Amino acid sequence: MDVLYFAWVRERIGLPKEAVETDAKTVMGLVEELRAREERYALAFSDLSALRVAVDQDLTDFDASITGAREVAFFPPMTGG
C-alpha cells in the first residue's frame, strides 16, 4: 500500500510517499510498525493527538481497518482561516 505523509510529518520522515508492505490490520498497527523502523518515524508518530489519518482518502480513526486499503495518509489537523 502507499503511505503518504504531509506537512511536518513529511519533514520529520523525509519522504512524501512510500510503498509499504505490512501485516497490520489497523492504522494503529501500521503506526506501530512504522515507529519500530527507526527514530525519524518514532519522532513523527510520537504524539498521535497531533495527527489525522485518511484511509483511501476517507478521514478515519487510528483503530480503522486497513485490510484491502490502497492508501493511508498522515497529516496534521486542518485549521480554518
Image (cartoon, grey):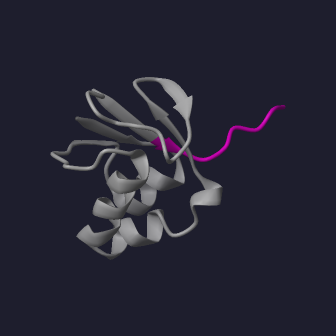
Task: List x then y, in percent, for residue 78.
Answer: 69, 38
**What residue is drawn where x is 30% and y is 60%?**
34
Q: Is residue 67 above or below residue 77?
A: above
Observer-nearest of 77 and 24: 24
Magenta region: which residues? Answer: 74-81
What residue occupies the far right of the structure in this picture? 81
What residue occupies the far top of the structure in this picture? 57
Q: Quadrant of the C terminus?
A: top right
Task: List x then y, in percent, for residue 35.
Answer: 35, 67
Answer whether residue 2 is magenta in the image.
no
What residue occupies the far left of the structure in this picture? 21
Q: Quadrant of the N terminus?
A: top left
Answer whether residue 77 is magenta in the image.
yes
Asked where in the image residue 25 lies, by quadrant, the reply is: top left
Q: Is residue 18 left or right of residue 76?
A: left
Observer-nearest of 71 and 14: 71
Observer-nearest of 38 and 13: 38
Q: Is residue 68 above or below residue 3?
A: above
Task: List x then y, in percent, for residue 52.
Answer: 58, 44
**What residue is drawn where x is 47% and y is 54%?**
9
**What secondary structure prevails in the magenta region?**
loop
**What residue is drawn where x is 34% and y is 76%?**
39
**What residue is drawn where x is 64% and y is 57%?**
50
Task: List x then y, in percent, for residue 5.
Answer: 41, 44
Q: How many marks?
A: 0
What residue occupies the far bottom of the structure in this picture? 39
Observer-nearest of 44 and 28: 28
